[in-house]
Image: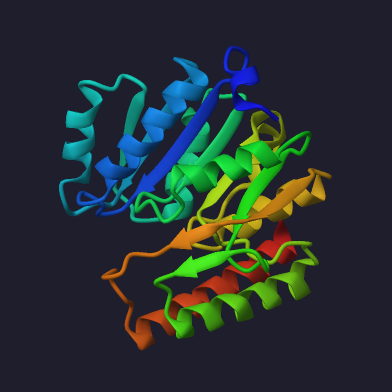
C-alpha cells in the first residue's frame, strides 16, 4: 500500500502517552509530525496525553503546540498508561488510530512499516520478539521477563501474537469503537485486553518485526518494584480472561 495514495482520504489519530518525558517528547513529536505532514497533509492529529507528570512535559508540549496546530494536549492526574491511551482513544477522530511511546523507542521509519503492512487488516502491531526484529538497550532480565510474559499470555488467551506489549500499534477506528466501553484495564496489561477484545470480534491483527531501541540510560525499576508490577500484571490478566 502506497501511503501517498491515501493522503487525501485517510485521517490518522496518533496518541502519545507521556509520563515525565520532558527531555524526549519534543524529539518524538518533531520526527513524527514532519513525516505525517508529508504523508497526510492536514488530515491527521497527534494527541499527547500527559498522565500524572511531575515534570514539565505538559509545558513543553504546550509550547510546541504554538507552531504545530495538529497537536492536541490532554492532561490527566493519574500515571496509568492504559488510562492515558484510552483517553486518547475517546478524543481520536481518525479513520485509523495509533499509539506510540513518547521516548521514540519506535521511530517513525519503523512505525511506517506497520502502516504499510495493514493492507486489509484491522490492526497492525510492532513486535520485538519475531525472528527479524532487532532490539537495542534492553537488559537480559527484562528480555527474559518479556518472553515469559508472552508465553503466559498465549497460554491464557490463545492469541496468535508473540509480543502484545510493544508500544506501537495501529487500529482501524471502526474496529476500535465497538470495544471502547469494554476497555477497563489501566495498567500495562491494557494492551492484552485491547488485543483480546479485537481478536474475539474477529479482527485481523498483523504482527510486524521492527527495530526497537530503548533508552541507553533509562530508569530501571528495582527488583522488588518489578516483582510487584509483575504480580499486578498477572492478576490483571486473570481478571481480563475471566470477565472480558
Coloration mode: rainbow
In percent of the image, x 54 and y 71: which residue is there? Answer: 233
Residue 1 x/y as whole percent: 70, 30
Residue 152 x/y as whole percent: 69, 77
Front residue (pair 38, 173): 38
Residue 136 can be seen in this image: yes
Front residue (pair 133, 172): 133
Front residue (pair 118, 203): 118
In percent of the image, x 34 and y 53: which residue is there? Answer: 103
Residue lying at the far top in this picture: please name it: 8
* Residue 157: quarter of image: bottom right
Residue 170 can be seen in this image: no
Left or right: residue 112 compared with residue 14: right
* Residue 2: quarter of image: top right
In percent of the image, x 17 and y 30: which residue is there? Answer: 63
Residue 194 x/y as whole percent: 64, 51
Question: Which quadrant, please, contains the C terminus?
Answer: bottom right
Residue lying at the far right in this picture: please name it: 202
Residue 47 x/y as whole percent: 40, 33
Name above or below for residue 138 compared with residue 65: below
The mark total stands at: 0
In percent of the image, x 65 and y 18: which residue is there? Answer: 5
* Residue 146: quarter of image: bottom right
Amino acid at each position: 500500500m502506497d501511503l501517498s495514495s491515501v493522503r487525501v482520504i485517510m485521517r490518522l489519530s496518533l496518541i502519545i502517552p507521556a509520563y515525565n518525558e520532558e527531555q524526549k517528547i519534543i524529539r518524538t513529536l518533531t520526527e513524527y509530525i514532519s513525516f505525517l505532514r508529508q504523508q497526510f497533509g492536514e488530515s491527521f492529529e497527534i494527541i499527547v496525553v500527559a498522565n500524572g507528570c511531575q515534570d514539565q512535559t505538559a509545558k513543553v508540549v504546550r509550547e510546541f503546540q504554538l507552531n504545530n496546530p495538529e497537536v492536541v494536549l490532554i492532561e490527566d492526574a493519574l500515571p496509568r498508561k492504559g488510562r492515558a491511551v484510552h483517553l486518547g482513544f475517546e478524543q481520536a477522530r481518525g479513520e485509523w488510530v495509533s499509539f506510540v511511546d513518547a521516548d521514540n523507542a519506535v521511530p517513525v521509519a519503523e512505525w511506517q512499516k506497520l502502516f504499510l503492512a495493514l493492507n486489509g487488516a484491522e490492526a497492525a502491531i510492532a513486535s520485538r520478539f519475531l525472528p527479524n526484529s532487532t532490539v537495542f538497550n534492553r537488559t537480559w532480565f527484562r528480555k527474559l521477563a518479556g518472553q515469559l510474559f508472552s508465553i503466559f499470555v498465549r497460554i491464557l488467551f490463545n492469541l496468535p501474537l508473540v509480543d502484545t506489549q510493544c508500544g506501537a500499534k495501529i487500529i482501524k477506528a471502526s474496529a476500535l469503537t465497538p470495544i471502547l466501553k469494554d476497555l477497563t484495564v489501566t495498567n500495562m496489561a491494557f494492551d492484552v485486553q485491547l488485543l483480546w477484545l479485537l481478536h474475539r470480534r474477529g479482527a485481523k491483527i498483523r504482527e510486524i518485526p521492527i527495530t526497537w531501541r530503548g533508552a541507553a540510560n533509562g530508569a530501571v525499576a528495582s527488583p522488588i518494584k518489578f516483582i510487584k508490577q509483575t504480580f499486578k500484571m498477572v492478576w490483571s490478566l486473570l481478571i481480563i480472561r475471566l470477565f472480558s
